Image (spheres, helix red, strand yellow):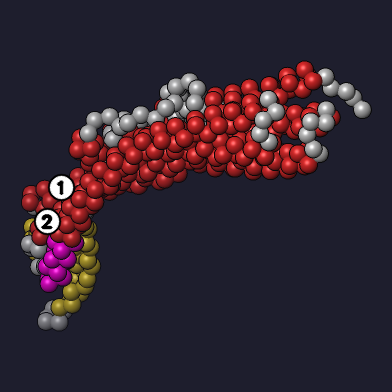
Amino acid sequence: MIAVHPSGMANSVRTLSLALAWAFATLSFSAPAQADYLPDPVAAEAALWASPSVAQARGNFAAQSLRSQSLQQGSAEWRLDAEAGQRRIQTMPSANQAEWGLALSRPIRMPARTEADRALAGALTAHAEASLGEALHESGRQLLMLWFDWLNASSQSHLWQAQYQLAEQQLATVNARIRLGEAPRAERVNTEAALAQVRLQQQQASTRAQQARNRLQAQFPGVGVSADVSLPAPRLPEGTAERYVETVLAHNHELFRARRQADVLQAEARQLAKLRSADPTLGVFYKNEAGGNEHVVGLGVGLTLPGGARRTNQLAAEQLGTTARDAAVQLEQRLRVDARADFEAATAQVENWQQADRAARALAEAARLAARGYELGEGSLDQVLLNRRLALEGQLMAQQTQLDALAANARLKLDSHLLWPLDVETDSAHAHP
């Protein structure tokens, strides 16, 4: 049996007490305020443009741009008709004469219809651009969600790792007191059980962190994942709720897309209205008759008279356009309510974190005092373990509310286009990285 000097025992207990105090005081309370807890802006922008949903939207935009060019050019095409025949003359003298003819014609697009087609082309391009912006914005939200999932899991893993080290130090202290005869052997069992529980939690937290990291890198491989989980103190949102709501509505791609959809349907209705007029066709023809003895050159004019289907198509498009416009108005009202709720929730999250932070500090102080009392021979191991568990729960709660507040603030900046560039420029939509 190895003898342990009482002074060594006191030093061991003092070390544990100081470790407890340091762990609860430095894991997040004294963490340096850093602004780089979010993804790198350049890497994030590149990752968003490379995401599958944005890539698909870019392809749709490119295809729609080509269709719009087709509308502007018009769908009228040249038509070549040929005919051949044989004329049989039964009167005397009877004869058979070969005859043939050629005709070249093309529908004429009237100026009013040309203007309607170009307006529809512009509306379709604007709708595709808004759809691309919406895909980009949704990818940004997805990136933020996966990023904070990883940040939360990684922070918990670091916290449980520190708790595991404390539990190991606690077991070493208990073993030393048992060897000195100052503690019953039952305390070793309790401490080993606590160590095993902490070890299990630490392993599970590490697994969750790795899984969250894998999900983030699988969807956004270009975003670097840093191991530094130091977090700044959350701040209240800047400005007022009214100003934030107006800023969000001025950049909301979902609203833009709904409005552009209504514009497309209304432009289609105007185009169909122009199609209800007669369609003129102009052409020239040449005929070789009477076995080549007669030659006919002429100008042909044709009219396609519209039927009832064009009128019903126009009425259907007008109804769809009115419905889409009403839906856009309702969407704007809902987005106003949601934006204000997001601003108020972000404000409340900061207040929640402040309260949780104060509670965690108090619980950490209680744990420190319990460890100090155990060092001086006052109190029991059960009280130390209880206070440490309560302090840990307080720390986890404070950390969770801190991340919730940071995530809410980042979402506000994303929706108001202050976090990453999310605006789409039509001219550069094809060439963007």
- Is 294 magenta? The answer is no
Q: Image point 83% across, 19% down: which residue?
A: 5
Residue 107 x, y percent position in the rendering: 14, 56
Left or right: residue 357 versus residue 336 is right
Q: Image point 33% across, 33% down: which residue?
A: 413
Left or right: residue 137 versus residue 215 is left
Residues at badges 1 and 2 in contact (C-beta under 8 Å)? yes
Left or right: residue 243 versus residue 181 is left
Instruction: Report the disc number at residue 270.
Output: 2
Is 302 rendered above or below residue 48? below
Q: Which residues are magenta?
A: 307-321
Is 42 rendered above or below residue 412? above
For disc 2, the neighbor class at 10 Å (few under 14, some 14 to 19, many from 20) is many
Q: Earlier in the sequence, mark 1 or mark 2?
A: 1
Q: Image quarter for residue 133?
A: top left
Name the residue beneath numbered marker 1: 119
Locate the C terminus by quadrant.
top left
For disc 1, the neighbor class at 10 Å (few under 14, some 14 to 19, many from 20) is many
Residue 199 x, y percent position in the rendering: 69, 39
Q: Image quarter for residue 374?
A: top right
Q: Image point 73% across, 38% down: which residue?
A: 191
